Image (cartoon, grey):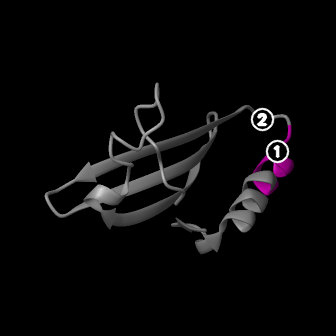
Amino acid sequence: MLFVSPTWGTVPIDTMIEHLHAIVRQNPNDKYTIIIGTDSHTTRQSTTLVTAVVIHQIGKGARFFYRKRGANRYSICAPASTARPNSVWSWLSF
């Protein structure tokens, strides 16, 4: 799984985690907020999914990574007849 960073370019997830650890190791006494979020945009033909990971070094700025993926609109969740009871979405891994 690859993530894009304006600072480090395209990196695998394990490298992204190493970068996050390195940031904290450089200034271990600073305060940090880690934000992980997702969003999607659906058109008639497809859905675009974005996942972002942000490390905010309070008072000193932030670094971020994101992953963008397109998918067939109807491949994102299972049809209602095949979804588990009490489950709104049956997500496929991405």
User: Residue 92, relative to residue 4: is it above or below?
Assistant: above
Q: Which residue is mark 2?
A: 30
Magenta-colored span: 22-28
Residue 81 is tagged as none
Question: Which is more toward the observer, 5 or 2?
Answer: 2
Main secondary structure along the magenta-highlighted residues: helix
Q: Residue at x 61, y 34 (%)?
A: 59
Residue found at the very far left of the displayed protein:
44
User: Residue 55, relative to residue 69: is it above or below?
Assistant: above
Contact? badges 1 and 2 (CB < 8 Å): yes
Q: What is the three-letter code of the residue carrying label 2? A: Asp
Q: Which residue is mark 1?
A: 27
Q: Residue at x 26, y 51 (%)?
A: 41
Q: Is 3 situated left or right of 90 in this image?
A: right
**On the image, which quarter does residue 83 sit in?**
top left
Identify the secondary structure beneath mark 2: loop
Q: Residue at x 28, y 57 (%)?
A: 74
Q: Residue at x 74, y 57 (%)?
A: 17
Question: Which is more toward the observer, 32 or 59?
Answer: 32
Q: What is the three-letter code of the residue carrying label 1? A: Asn
Identify the secondary structure beneath mark 1: loop
Residue 66's spot in the image, x, y percent? 50, 58
State the CA–CA distance, disc 1 to disc 2. Answer: 6 Å
